[in-house]
Amino acid sequence: MVSSILVTGGTGFIGSHTCAALLNAGYDVIVLDNLSNSDSSVIQRLGQICGREPSFIKGDIRDTSLLNTLFQEHSVSAVIHFAGLKAVSESVDKPLMYYQNNVGGTLTLLTAMQLANVKTIIFSSSATVYGDPVSVPITENFPRSCTNPYGASKMMIEDILADLYTTKSNWRIGRLRYFNPVGAHASGLIGENPIGIPNNLMPFITQTAAGLRQEVSIFGNDYDTPDGTGIRDYIHVEDLANGHLAALDYLNQNRELLTVNLGTGQGASVLEMINTFEHSTGCQVPYRVVGRRQGDIAECWADTKLANHLLGWQANRGLEDMCRDAWRWQLRCLRD
Ligand code: NAD
Ligand code: UFG
């Protein structure tokens, strides 16, 4: 039986781009997703992009019997675990749902993996675990903290994985801390399609440029940054997807607990993002400065030396690529 990579949350934004990268690299892929924040049409679109589709199982990572059957029926060499809920404000309103889904789901998945003797996992962690960092760029040994249940769920899962590694050292574990993933696949066939009003900057910009929203609210221009607006490390989702392949290669060669930042190492302000979007697409993005958003920090960007050194990986797409690809995808969403 040919071994496959199980991708939980594989029809979602980052998962779908990672499936494309895996399929293009020759891996066989099984997607497990409950479609709570995505659409199964992604599977056919992956087929269009890659010339073959991943196998798809609609199901939940909290479903023990489904997982046990899946691992019995398929030979899985590694799991890339994206499935999770990710809206910070929703996590404040519904903490139990977030802990059940993210932490409970991961425990169920890890238990089924252990039973099936599948011991390689790559987990989607987040720069949110750095809280409000004392300085930038942020290295992996910065102290962790959190201010909401979403962030707490990421820290808890990181800790569970570390404990698992310590007690069962035959596990190979990657904890990848993503900075701000944006953009879409260059094919224009897959991207990010948030349900309702977007929380994040880039989908808000593209929806405003498309006329679906009146203006972008800039959350504060009184931060201690060159133009006063918040600075983040935006990374193209295809670069991020490739980071998973590099991590998989690394873990195949090294039995380790790998913890790395995946970012570009460059910060961009909200105003810079809007200006770059306007220049690279020719679209206008009306905006208005409003008060700060609660819980936001001034600046956050990655030190990427460890990922560069260990994985031989670096992001190579710039802000213009991110804007152009996000816009191409937005136009496709308007047509579909
Ligand atoms: P997404 O919502 O697009 O994808 C997550 C997928 O998981 C969705 O398709 C959803 O249907 C599925 N899912 C959720 N709960 C599930 C469950 N219990 N069982 C099966 N499937 C389930 O989100 P994304 O942006 O692709 O994020 C992927 C991962 O990366 C998440 O864990 C997220 O917390 C993490 N992350 C995202 C960002 C970001 O800004 N997008 C930043 C850092 C970390
Ligand atoms: N912003 C605006 N207006 C908007 C949306 C955002 O001005 O309508 C600003 C924010 O204040 C911030 C920047 O744009 O300065 C980026 O905001 P996002 O909401 O796009 O991203 P965050 O950095 O706040 O958070 C994201 C994810 C988190 C994750 C974090 C680090 O939403 O889940 O990146 O990976 F933890």
Image (tube, helix red, strand yellow):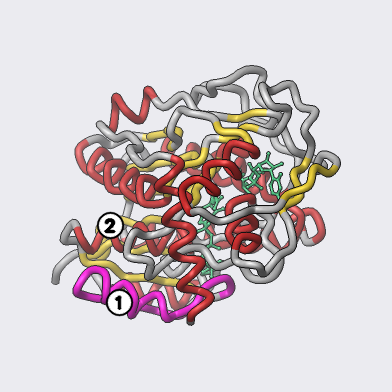
Q: Is residue 309 left or right of residue 320?
A: left
Give the mark, 1 or 2, whose residue is nearer the N terminus.
2
Instruction: Give the camera-side residue of 85 and 283.
Output: 283
Residue ID at (65%, 57%): 204
Span highlighted in magenta in the image: 36-58
Query: Looking at mark 1, is its residue's CB closer than 8 Å to ligand 1?
Result: no
Q: The disc labelled 2 sits on which kind of residue?
A: Ala
Q: Is residue 216 left or right of residue 144?
A: right
Discs 1/2, front: 2
Residue ID at (30%, 56%): 78
Q: CA distance from mark 1 to mark 2?
A: 15 Å
Residue ID at (31%, 70%): 30
In the depicted structure, whether residue 335 falls above or below residue 177: below
Q: Residues within 10 Å of mark 2 (few under 14, many from 20)?
A: many
Q: Is residue 6 left or right of residue 135?
A: left
Kindly identify which residue carries mark 2: 21
The location of residue 290, given as percent across then percent down, is 83, 44
The location of residue 68, given as percent across then percent down, is 40, 72
Instruction: Give the camera-side residue of 224 and 306.
Output: 224
Residue 200 in view here = yes
Q: The disc labelled 1 sits on which kind of residue?
A: Ser
The location of residue 29, given as percent across then percent down, is 27, 67
Residue 172: image quadrant is top left
